[in-house]
Image (cartoon, rainbow, N blue to C red):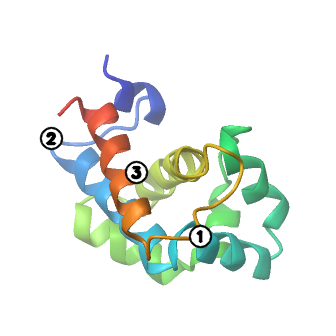
Amino acid sequence: MGLFDEVLGGLEAQAGQHAALYEEVASLVTQSGGVNGLIQQFEQQGLGQLVSGWVGGASNTPISPDQLVQAIGQDKITSIASKVGMSESQVTDGISKLLPLMVGHLTPNGTAPTTGGGQLETEALGLLKSKLFGS
């Protein structure tokens, strides 16, 4: 069993769907303005305490489906599900496990990157992807 399978805890998906879901979640982080933007987005939705627990990898507590919809919106879940060919519940389950891992990986010292214009985050997400997929 690979690390990605271990992280997603048996999320059923066809070949290539795990990688596609990872790419969509990584895109979600970068489109939110990186980790800082994502944290701000969660704080605005009253979920700052949850996301702050992920910073530095202190806690990989999954976000509930309702909290995820509250934070990023049902339309985003629907869009990702359509793109990756998974059900909305599969997407919500996968994001709820991947997002804490990504935030923790992008904030290893307990703080979000403030330089690099997103390039540092993109590189870090690429490194995490190689750990998860082994390539």
Quarter of the image containing the C terminus? top left
Residue under label 1: 114
- Circle 2: element type: loop
- Cα distance in 3D space between marks 1 and 3: 14 Å
The amino acid beneath tag 2 is Ala
Badge 3 amino acid: Ala
Query: In this rendering, would 50 be left or right of 92?
Result: right
**Dot placed on the residue nearer the N-terminal end, 1 or 3:** 1
In the figure, residue 61 lies in which quadrant? Answer: top right
Residue at disc 3, secondary structure: helix
Q: Is residue 123 left or right of residue 40?
A: left
Marks 2 and 3, how far apart in space?
24 Å
Q: Residue at x 36, y 69 (%)?
A: 27
Q: Residue 14, image x and y in percent?
A: 19, 42
Q: Amino acid at mark 1?
A: Thr
What number is the disc on residue 66? none
- For residue 11, side relative to residue 39 (left or right): left
Reading the chain from its start, which is encountered first: label 2 or label 1? 2
Give the residue number, with chain letter if any, for mark 3.
124
- Could you tell me which quadrant the N terminus lies in? top left
- Single out the residue that lies furthest toward the front: 115
Nearer-N-terminus badge (2/3): 2
Give residue 15's mark.
2
Q: Is residue 125 above or below residue 101?
A: below
